[in-house]
Amino acid sequence: MSAVDTPIASHVDDSHGDPNANYLDAKHGIGSWLYTLDHKRIGLMYLVMISLSFLAGGIFALLVRLELFTRGKTIVDAETYNKFFTLHGAIMVFLFIIPSIPAGLGNFFLPIMIGAKDVAFPRLNMWSFYIYLIGASISLTSIVMGSIDTGWTFYTPYSTQTSAAVASMTLGVFVLGFSSILTGLNFIVTIHTMRAPGITWRRLPLFCWGMYATALIQVLATPVLAITLALLMMERIFGLGVFNPKLGGDPVLFQHFFWFYSHPAVYIMIVPGMAIISEVLATFSRRPIVGYFAVAMSSLGLALLGFLVWGHHMFTAGMSEFSTMLFSALTFLVAIPSGVKVFNWTATLYKGEIWFTTPMLYALSFIFLFSIGGLTGLFLGSLSVDIHLHDTYFVVAHFHYVMMGGTVMGLLAGMFYWWPKMTGKLYNEASAKVGWFLVFVGFNVTFISQFIMGSRGMPRRYYDYLPQFEPFHKASTIGSWILGLGLLIEAFTLLSSLKTGKKSPPNPWGSAGYEWNTATPPLLFNFAETPVITRGPYDYHLATPEELSDGFPPEKPAE
């Protein structure tokens, strides 16, 4: 980013205080946060609520694993167990994974990375957050109203007949969808209209490309989920018969509607994680991303192909042979843009000046774990193999290697990478690496055993199991304890740095990314003057020594 030469053209909102003030110090008090239009504060509030959702979903996951530690009843009965795994899935998917990176880190960094003072619609951004709070509150009322035991997919006909609190949970998810749509719309307009001079499409950071692709999916796919859940609620309340075969409906139609949204939603979850990994790898290998444009277009390719493969979730649902073959072929096609990213990331690392920081360790973990998740997805995309593996623990392990091994590892990489910029504090690197080690080991112990169980026929969601599966369930449960301990250490590392951490320099990693050339923490309106961009976000050979001076460790001095 070159020297700035153009003042901010738009007006300064005096209610926000001095535009050159630090955004954390601009105004104090709870009211200044509740009514803020600052995208950075909104992003932080999202991160707080998303973290609380992650904690709640994680507690239910640990309770599920504890119940399965031994055969028969361990801590709860079968009905309560069904509620535990349903709440774990619903909270993790709708309250945590889908909004985690776009609404949290995306809100904070996307405007900064394109040289804008805020998102295109600041008030709409604020309302998106409050809509998220309303939707989350409605969803969580299902816990006190008898909870829900349908699984996070709400499959009919059971979801239309059970006495569980399906209406409150689905209404909450319905409301959450509006938050997702509005956030996606805001990001699309922001990227199209508010890029600083010099930021062309070929100079757009790959994080912004990922947010752009994600926003397209949010805007186009989420209305389908809203319609599906609205039909489900009307089916329960008015008995419309859309999914009731006695009234001429079809319960399988619900699956088609649900997965037409939910498979693109997989890429709402994973593409933002991929976007973070591109930023982290470039910084800690000191190289431009190999095949920048191919990596950018692969995000859009995943967004497009995600709409075409929903049927691979339904190979055993009674579709025609031609349909199953078509969906199987399209499923294999999805591997191409994913493979482009992985191969180009690997090429970026080749002969790179690797710096094994905590963000880099999480980025490398992402590549390893996501590759396992992607390759096991090819097994499930094969018709003959899927017949055996469908609805087994193999599917559970595959899903978690993509979502937890992908999205969550990407989120943790981004949190540790950008934490100094967000807070102005450095965390304890040794403590963070201990937490990473426990997270990585615990995750693999938890879910590799589930791959083995699933390949041997252990069905998912079952309360009890045959004796031969008990050692694998015990190993999986012990792994979940290690994983939980690692996450607690990481949370403690970050939060304790707010009080005891050293002050961070503006660019502690020596990154060439645009966002590191702002104040730390960023100014209220991000920039005192509109920046003019003269290089790409990964052009280390064009960056000035001043831009990179803070970030090289003693053993790797800047040339």
Image (tube, rainbow, N blue to C red):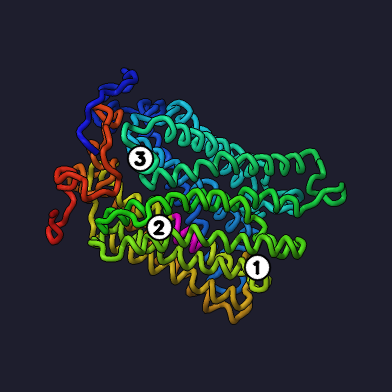
Please name the amino acid that badge 2 sits on.
Answer: Met
Cα gap from disc 3 to disc 1, whole angstroms: 39 Å
Write the start and end of the magenta stretch as one range.
400-407
| 441 sits to left or right of 225 | left
Point out the tag, 2 or 3, that comes first from the N-terminus.
Answer: 3
| 164 sits to left or right of 178 | right
Could you say where residue 453 lies in the image, as x and y percent from the top left?
57, 75
Q: Are marks 2 and 3 in contact (CB under 8 Å)?
A: no
Q: Is residue 317 above or below residue 37?
A: below
Q: What residue did someone put label 1 on?
A: 390
Please name the amino acid that badge 1 sits on.
Answer: His
Task: Answer few, some or many: residues within 10 Å of disc 1's Cα (few below 14, many 20 plus, some between 14 and 19).
Answer: many
Could you say where residue 275 lies in the image, as x and y percent from the top left?
40, 50
Point out the tag, 3 or 1, that comes first from the N-terminus.
Answer: 3
Could you say where residue 358 lies in the image, as x and y percent from the top left?
29, 58
Q: Is residue 478 above or below residue 115?
A: below
Q: Quadrant of residue 334?
A: bottom right
| 27 sits to left or right of 404 | left
Q: Quadrant of residue 218?
A: top right
Q: What residue did someone put label 3 on?
A: 109
Task: Answer few, some or many: residues within 10 Å of disc 3's Cα (few below 14, many 20 plus, some between 14 and 19).
Answer: many
Can the viewer see residue 463 in this picture? no
Could you say where residue 225 lies in the image, as x and y percent from the top left?
64, 44
Of the 4 image quadrants, the one containing the C terminus is bottom left
